[in-house]
Amino acid sequence: MDLFAQGTIAANLIEPTTELGELFTLYWARVMPPDQRGNLALPFFHLRSDGFWHLVPQPDKEAILVAIRQTRSVGQLRDVVLGARLDDDLYVLLCAEESRDLLRAVLIETYFALEVRPSLVEQGTINAGSPGFCGVPPRSGGMV
C-alpha cells in the first residue's frame, strides 16, 4: 500500500523489488519478535492461494511456477516470478487514496493484535513522511 501511495506501483504488477523487501522488513520488525527474521518470498509466493494475488511467471518459467509448492528465498522467487497481479477491482481500490486508507485500517483492525496496531499505523505514517515518498507529509491521526 505504501508503494501505491508513493506512485511506485503504476501498473497492475507488483514486483519483488528491494524496495518492497525493505518495507516488508520494517513492518515485520513492528509485529514480530526480534529473533525471528522475515522473508518476503514466503508471503509473496503463498498469497497466490488467497484468490486475489496472481503470480506472473518469468518468461519460459510457467511450468516451473505451476510445479513448485514453496520458495525459500527472494532470489529463488525472482528466478521464477516476474511479479504478482491483483484482481482488477482491488487494483483500482489501491490506486485511490481514500479506499486504500480504508483497506489499510480494516486489515490492521482485522488481522493484528490490539497492542501492535498503533505501531503499524506509526510505520505507515513514517513511510509516508520519508524523503522520496511523494513528499507528502503524514496527515494527523494516522492512516496513510
Image: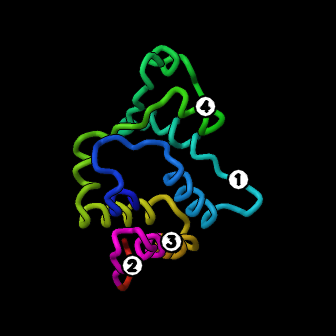
Inspect the magenta stretch and tell me whether residue 47 lies in it.
Answer: no
Depth check, mark 4 against mark 2: the one in front is 4
Q: Is residue 40 left or right of residue 52?
A: right
| Mark carried by residue 130 | none
Quarter of the N terminus within the rendering: bottom left
| Sequence-first disc among 3 and 1 | 1
| Mark carried by residue 76 | 4
| Mark carried by residue 142 | 2
Kindly identify the amino acid type of the residue bearing the numbered disc 3.
Gln
Residue segment shown in magenta: 124-139
Quarter of the C terminus within the rendering: bottom left
Residue 118 at x, y percent in the picture: 51, 76
Residue 70 at x, y percent in the picture: 60, 29
**Residue receiving disc 3:** 123
**Residue receiving disc 1:** 37
Of the pair 3 and 91, the residue shown nearer to us: 3
| Sequence-first disc among 1 and 2 | 1
Q: Is residue 113 left or right of residue 124?
A: right
Kindly identify the amino acid type of the residue bearing the numbered disc 2.
Gly
Of the pair 66 and 73, the residue shown nearer to us: 73
Kindly identify the amino acid type of the residue bearing the numbered disc 1.
Arg
The crowd level at tag 2 (other Cα within 10 Å; few <14, some 14-19, many 20+) is: some
4 and 2 marks in contact (CB < 8 Å)? no
| Sequence-first disc among 1 and 4 | 1
| Sequence-first disc among 3 and 4 | 4
Marks 1 and 4, Cα distance to the nearest angstrom? 17 Å
| Disc 3 secondary structure class | helix
Of the pair 13 and 32, the residue shown nearer to us: 13
Q: Is residue 13 above or below residue 115?
A: above
